[in-house]
Amino acid sequence: MVDKELGKILIIDDNEDVLLAAKLLLKKHAHDVIIEKNPKKIPFLMNNDTYDVILLDMNYSQDITSGKEGFFWLEKILEIDPSAVVILITAFGDVEMAVKALKVGATDFVLKPWQNEKLLATISSAIKLKKSYKEVDKLKQAKKLLESDMNQPFKDIIGVSDAMKNVFSVIDKVAKTDANVLILGENGTGKELIARALHQKSIRKDNVFVGVDMGAITETLFESELFGHKKGAFTDAKDDRAGRFEVANKGTLFLDEIGNLSMPLQSKLLTVLQNREVTRIGSNKNTPVDIRLICATNMPLHDMVQENTFRQDLLYRMNTVELKLPPLRDRLEDIPLLADHFMKTYCHKYRKQIKKIAAATLKKLQKYSWPGNIRELQHAIERAVIMGEGSVLNPDDFFFLSEKADAKKDMSENYNLDEVEKVVIQRAINKHSGNISKAAKELGLTRASLYRRLEKHGL
């Protein structure tokens, strides 16, 4: 029996009798049937809607025998949507032409006058083919994601300092276990790189590594992104979608910026971690998930537990092992290695002929405090490589670091209360990623008071 849900079908034929006959037959089996006499409306129709199958006549009134118009519109359809499933409607004598069209990109053809069961079977097969196209596209996207994950620009963690040797030691001990890991460290210290290293050295290394920036997910999308949803569960849920937990099944799930979660979202996450199963929005079915959890944050979670802004039971669930990454200012001996690595990377990227970094330049880099850590060093080297004119990177190529240091020094000697207040407020806002409630709490202000000061200073 042919599937009664044949999706949305578009039929283009200049013969009104053919259109009406086809619609009368197909409307009993299809979700929607759209008919059109004028092929010139094809671009408009396709740009404003999507169709599971398109039935296209080969000949029109301008040229009723050669099929040239049919070929023209077939190519136009595939130009607009390369994955479109097109079934040609053709007369018996045009079979050779139809076979030629299959080579161009048509999916199948039906002969006039058609047999109803044959037409329905052809469309049903085409629908299944359309679904297989979608599956192939999903697999291609997953493959690209895996390849991009495996081909990260800096595969190895660079460092010879005692601080980094300690990090390496912890990774070697923990990686081969399935223990949950919490990575703590300032922004730019390489927390995601450490998470990937843990995955690559684990027993799950042949499975997927899925990273999620929790700070970038809104509360309304949290459950959909992490746990998935069923088609029709909400307005924009046009298809079934697996959440990140399901995608990461048998692999590693990395939740970055975990400290940004509100208490209600922390509760939902804890429930999933405890039960090791997720329920998609719009479904009553529980799906078991087998993941290795790695979390990371630059926020003081232990202090947040004391302040009742982070759940203690969730913290215990996440940090079977806690790994603290040192800031760059505490591993100055690694700067020459890192700087050389970034220099070679960006010389290759920008086709520059810079050979080395001067010793005086390295001393300058080691004297700077690097509040942005490795990420700031990386951007500084990239900028210097782009702007550098010689074969050696000299101290003058990093003049912008001196400007930053001078600005910081000037600020420390600035006793203007308004200016000091403005800087302190800005730093609190930056620290908490724009979260007014958290910034106000740290500053000892109410939200209303902080808003007044923000308006006062034009922030």
Image (spheres, rainbow, N blue to C red):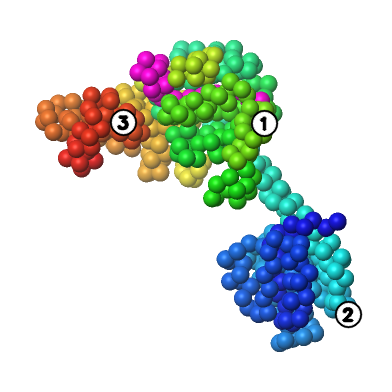
Quadrant for the N terminus, please.
Answer: bottom right
User: Is residue 95 part of the magenta span, yes or no?
Assistant: no
Mark 1 or mark 2: name the one nearer the start of the chain. 2
- Residue 418 in the image: x percent, y percent? 13, 33
Res. 18 image quadrant: bottom right
Say which residue label 3 marks.
Answer: 437
Q: 10 Å neighbourhood of mark 1: few (<14), some, or many (≥20)?
A: few
* Mark sitting on residue 93: 2
Say which residue label 1 marks.
Answer: 287
Mark 2 or mark 3: name the one nearer the start of the chain. 2
Q: What's drawn in magenta, residue-wise?
A: 290-310
Determine the residue positioned at 49% across, 45% down.
351
Q: 10 Å neighbourhood of mark 2: few (<14), some, or many (≥20)?
A: few
Determine the residue positioned at 55% across, 47% down.
234
**Kind of residue at disc 2:** Gly
1 and 2 marks in contact (CB < 8 Å): no
Q: How many marks?
A: 3
Res. 6 image quadrant: bottom right
Res. 180 image quadrant: top right
**Kind of residue at disc 1:** Thr
Q: Is residue 90 left or right of residue 424?
A: right
- Residue 38 in the image: x percent, y percent? 66, 80
Q: Is residue 366 left or right of residue 251?
A: left
User: Is residue 304 part of the magenta span, yes or no?
Assistant: yes
Quadrant for the C terminus, please.
Answer: top left
Q: Secondary structure at mark 2?
A: helix
Determine the residue positioned at 52% across, 28% down.
268
* Mark sitting on residue 184: none
